[in-house]
């Protein structure tokens, strides 16, 4: 077993499968079934096993911060899989992942991520119980993330969208998360510019899709909402941005964290991405820790809960920043107490 130690958080490879055509690594905090690690199953054509593990370590660390911030009751983790032909290994991937999860005896729980689907999770659930992906539920994890992002937007606007004065927004990435966010903004009268490699996804009624060669980072808007890839914004783009606020649903949207700090020094409000994109893990916490309330709830009940929780946490963070706290100190100030009940139990109490 390969392990790599980091400080704050410490994650390592807890279980692995390596072959010529498929490698799978469970990367997580060293934990157990009382506080299982939680993170999705990602399948990519990584250049090497080392690159696959490095991405797993990065993502598991981000998941740790997100879980700790919202007090989900989970530790941080991720399952990363490497295959030259991802589509050709799906059957084997499901079997291997089930075996790895079973070997950890509940210390890791997974769900969807890049190149894995709800259908994959349904197949995985037939082999192991260590899956949280709203299987058989009307709740959609991407929709939960989108509604959390909208809660963060409302925190920045200091008003609900139904009451805020419509402005100009640019949504980069119009998949399941960004597409939902962009459509809701359009419904509330916003001018919404959309950018996506798939122009069809960016082209829906009310949106203004941008040409693929358009320097979108030069467009003056009130809100920039990155919903696409990590490392989207480089130094040149950051220096040219003309925005009032950045609300990232994408993980680590800046190529370097210093770029976000430079924007903040220019007076641009930049929310930390773990604060914004926690909708899916909040939903996971409900599913895990309030199963009865989860079974009896409608999707809109879950989305409203997620939106309110993210709105409240983001508002508290912005208040701490306005009082002069650093980004790190403000996040510590608003983070959930480890000894408190998981956030999912609050949904059960509310019901």
Image (tube, rainbow, N blue to C red):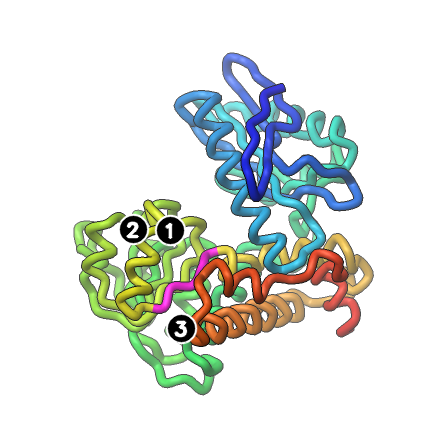
- Residues tagged 3 and 2 counted as in contact (Cβ below 8 A): no
Quadrant of the image for the C terminus? bottom right
State the residue in front, 158 or 129.
Answer: 158
Q: Secondary structure at mark 2?
A: loop
Which range is magenta? 269-273
User: Any magenta on residue 222?
Assistant: no
Residue position for label 1: 253
Graded by Cα atoms within 10 Å as few (under 14), some (14 to 19) or many (20 or more), the crowding at tag 3 reads: many
Q: CA distance from mark 1 to mark 3?
A: 21 Å
- Residues tagged 2 and 1 counted as in contact (Cβ below 8 A): yes
Q: Secondary structure at mark 3?
A: helix
Q: Secondary structure at mark 1?
A: loop
Give the mark nearer the N terminus: 2 vs 1: 2
What percent of the width, then of the height, locates residue 103? 75, 26
| Residue 21 visible to an observer of this rendering | yes
Q: CA distance from mark 2 to mark 1?
A: 6 Å
In this view, the residue farthest toward the right is 292
User: Any magenta on residue 272?
Assistant: yes
Give the mark nearer the N terminus: 1 vs 3: 3
Residue position for label 3: 185
Determine the residue positioned at 62% across, 60% down.
70
Q: Examine the image and state in which quarter residue 286 appears.
A: bottom right
State the residue in front, 296 or 110.
Answer: 110
Quadrant of the image for the N terminus? top right
Residue position for label 2: 233
């Amino acid at each position: 077993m390969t392990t790599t130690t980091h400080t704050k958080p410490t994650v390592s490879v807890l279980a692995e499968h390596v072959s010529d055509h498929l490698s799978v690594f469970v990367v997580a905090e060293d934990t157990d079934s009382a506080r299982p690690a939680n993170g999705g199953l990602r399948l990519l054509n990584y250049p090497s096993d080392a690159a696959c593990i490095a991405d797993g370590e990065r993502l598991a660390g981000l998941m740790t911060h997100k879980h700790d911030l919202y007090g989900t009751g989970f530790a941080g983790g991720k399952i990363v899989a490497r295959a030259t032909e991802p589509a050709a290994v799906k059957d084997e991937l499901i079997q291997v992942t089930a075996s790895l999860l079973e070997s950890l005896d509940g210390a890791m729980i997974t769900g969807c991520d890049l190149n894995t689907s709800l259908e994959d999770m349904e197949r995985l659930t037939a082999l192991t119980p260590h899956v949280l992906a709203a299987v058989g539920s009307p709740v959609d994890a991407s929709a939960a993330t989108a509604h959390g992002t909208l809660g963060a937007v409302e925190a920045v606007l200091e008003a609900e969208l139904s009451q805020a004065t419509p402005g100009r927004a640019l949504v980069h990435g119009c998949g399941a998360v960004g597409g939902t966010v962009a459509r809701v903004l359009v419904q509330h009268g916003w001018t919404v510019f959309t950018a996506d490699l798939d122009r069809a996804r960016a082209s829906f009624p009310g949106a203004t899709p941008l040409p693929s060669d358009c320097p979108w980072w030069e467009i003056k808007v009130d809100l920039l909402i990155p919903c696409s890839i990590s490392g989207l914004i480089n130094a040149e783009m950051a220096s040219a941005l003309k925005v009032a606020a950045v609300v990232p649903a994408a993980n680590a949207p800046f190529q370097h964290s210093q770029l976000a700090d430079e924007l903040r020094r220019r007076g641009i409000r930049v929310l930390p991405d773990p604060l914004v994109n926690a909708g899916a893990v909040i939903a996971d916490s409900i599913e895990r820790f309030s199963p009865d309330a989860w079974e009896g709830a409608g999707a809109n009940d879950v989305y409203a809960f997620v939106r309110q929780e993210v709105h409240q946490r983001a508002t508290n963070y912005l208040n701490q920043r306005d009082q002069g706290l650093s980004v790190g100190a403000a996040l510590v100030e608003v983070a959930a107490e480890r000894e408190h009940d998981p956030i999912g139990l609050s949904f059960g109490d509310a019901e």
